[in-house]
Image: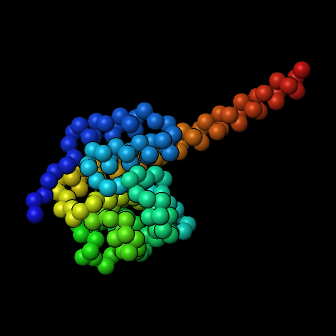
Amino acid sequence: MSVDKKIDFNLFKVVFRAMAHSEDLDIMTNQLAQLLVAALDIKGCTIFALNPESRELEALANFGLSSDYVFKGPVLTERSLAGDANGVPTIISDVHKTDRLQYPEDAEKEGIGAIVSIPIRFHEKPIGALRLYHHDVWNISDDDVDSLLVLAESIGIAMNFTRTLKVLKSIRYAINDIDGLHILESD
């Protein structure tokens, strides 16, 4: 089977612009999921955040997948493509020829032929996963995997930026509320 390179510089430009122009994590991740599905001509995409206490991957955004598949049950890092928790990509070129899926029946029912799972990391620490779902068997190129690793690292930076920005805005609103109280008290 031939291995086609799908990711090029134009995709990076579109994705990085989407990340650069968003201050909201939900909006940013939903836009990214939609962009990746369209640009890569794949079935679906999910962007997960890792819950450090439960060790579950929690969906931040998804596109192209049914709600039955998205809400099939908890996605446990130890059982679901464990490479995400270890910070390495997991490539399932053919879901019918693997025993590494946590929910193989659901993947088959959803019409998924292949899954590429790329860890999202920040400062070398896994904080989530980027999962791409293809309709068919997918022999993804090494260049595309490398590109997805760079993209996922950038998503990790953007996730932390938007979270930090949200905290800073909350602090600013709290300070403004306190200042408002001082103005009322001085009257």
Q: Is residue 4 above or below residue 77?
A: above
Using the image as rendered, state which of residue 122 and residue 56 is in the foreground: 56
Q: Residue at (53%, 42%) from the top-left corner?
A: 164
Using the image as rendered, state which of residue 167 and residue 111 is in the foreground: 111
Indicate the quadrant where residue 95 lies: bottom left
Q: Residue furthest top?
A: 187
Q: Quadrant of the N terminus?
A: bottom left
Asked if one can make out residue 89 in the rendered structure from this viewpoint, the answer is no
Picture mark count: 0
Using the image as rendered, state which of residue 160 and residue 2 is in the foreground: 2
Q: Give x and y (percent) for residue 92.
A: 27, 68
Q: Give x and y (percent) for residue 125.
A: 41, 58
Q: Quadrant of the C terminus?
A: top right
| Relative horizontal placement of residue 94, taking residue 37 as reference (left or right) | left
Q: Give x and y (percent) for residue 174.
A: 71, 36
Asked if one can make out residue 119 in the rendered structure from this viewpoint, the answer is yes
